[in-house]
Image: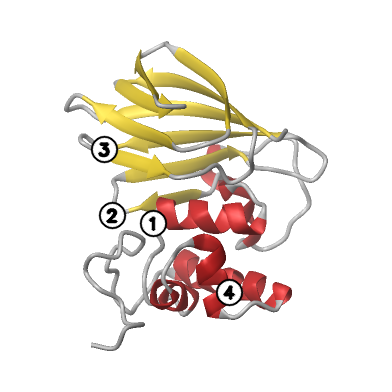
Amino acid sequence: MRSEELTTEDPYADGGGPDPDAVDARLAARLAELRAERGWTLGELAERSSVSRSTLSRAERGEISPTAALLNRLCHVYGRTMSRLLGEVEAASAPVPVLRAADQRVWEDRASGFVRRSVSPPHPALRGELVEGRLAPGADLAYDRPPVAGLEQHIWVLDGALAVTADATEHRLDAGDCLRLRVWGPTRFRCLGDTGARYALAVVLP
């Protein structure tokens, strides 16, 4: 096997097949555009993101469905929140004051059992956004860095139980509990129990 080919140990690919859905296809194209806008080679992006060239190449070609961990690293490099990146793959439209449930974008990380609904997506005139997160039983989601340093987060558990680790401290949250913090380093979200967890995440740019 050539050194640039994907191996089974690669933690940033979920092994998705060659036929991505429409969202994955648009996301792949946007990732390729972002790198091209900066004039970076795959090797340069690999150095900046600490993700292998093969995984980056497959993600840009739509051969894999990116995991949340991979998107988080790329968001950090490109200076975007995940909601902003995902919003960029949708057709441009004028902002509206009411976003109906049927119009809220949903993205799924099938590898980790994480579903993300953009309840109130980012907008250039606003500093905050609102996200609903769902973790399947046993899901364990780790981010090695925030997409934007100093990002303010408010995590309100709606159903189930959640363990959130930040600054090397684990916070165990039950339904109704809220954790608020500024994110500078690694974070980890774990679903506790066997019923899944649902939470609201308010994100405010620094």
Q: Nearer the viewer, mark 3 or mark 4?
A: 4
Of the image marks 1 and 4, the number of the one nearer the N terminus: 4
Q: Amino acid at mark 2?
A: Ala
In three-dimensional space, the C-alpha distance between marks 1 and 2, rounded to whole angstroms, equals 7 Å
Whether residues under marks 2 and 3 lie with C-beta atoms below 8 angstroms apart, the answer is: no
Q: Is residue 181 visible?
A: yes
Q: Which structural element holds mark 2?
A: loop
In three-dimensional space, the C-alpha distance between marks 2 and 3, rounded to whole angstroms, equals 11 Å
Percent x, y for residue 50?
47, 62
Q: Which structural element holds mark 3?
A: loop
**Number of the label disc, if any, that sits on residue 136:** 3
In three-dimensional space, the C-alpha distance between marks 2 and 4, rounded to whole angstroms, equals 26 Å
In three-dimensional space, the C-alpha distance between marks 3 and 4, rounded to whole angstroms, equals 35 Å
Check the image and report above or below for 82 versus 12: above
Percent x, y for residue 32?
58, 75
Q: Which structural element holds mark 1?
A: loop
Residue corresponding to mark 4: 44
What residue lies at 79% left-to-right and 45% top-to-bottom?
124
Check the image and report above or below for 89 versus 37: above
Of the image marks 2 and 4, the number of the one nearer the N terminus: 4
Q: Amino acid at mark 3?
A: Ala
Q: Image quarter for residue 34?
A: bottom right
Of the image marks 3 and 1, the number of the one nearer the N terminus: 1
Of the image marks 2 and 3, the number of the one nearer the N terminus: 2
Percent x, y for residue 120?
63, 37
What residue lies at 51% left-to-right and 44% top-to-bottom?
145
Between 132 and 162, the one lying in front of the other is 162
Q: Amino acid at mark 4?
A: Glu
Q: Nearer the viewer, mark 3 or mark 1?
A: 1
Quarter of the image where the N terminus is located: bottom left
Percent x, y for residue 136?
26, 38
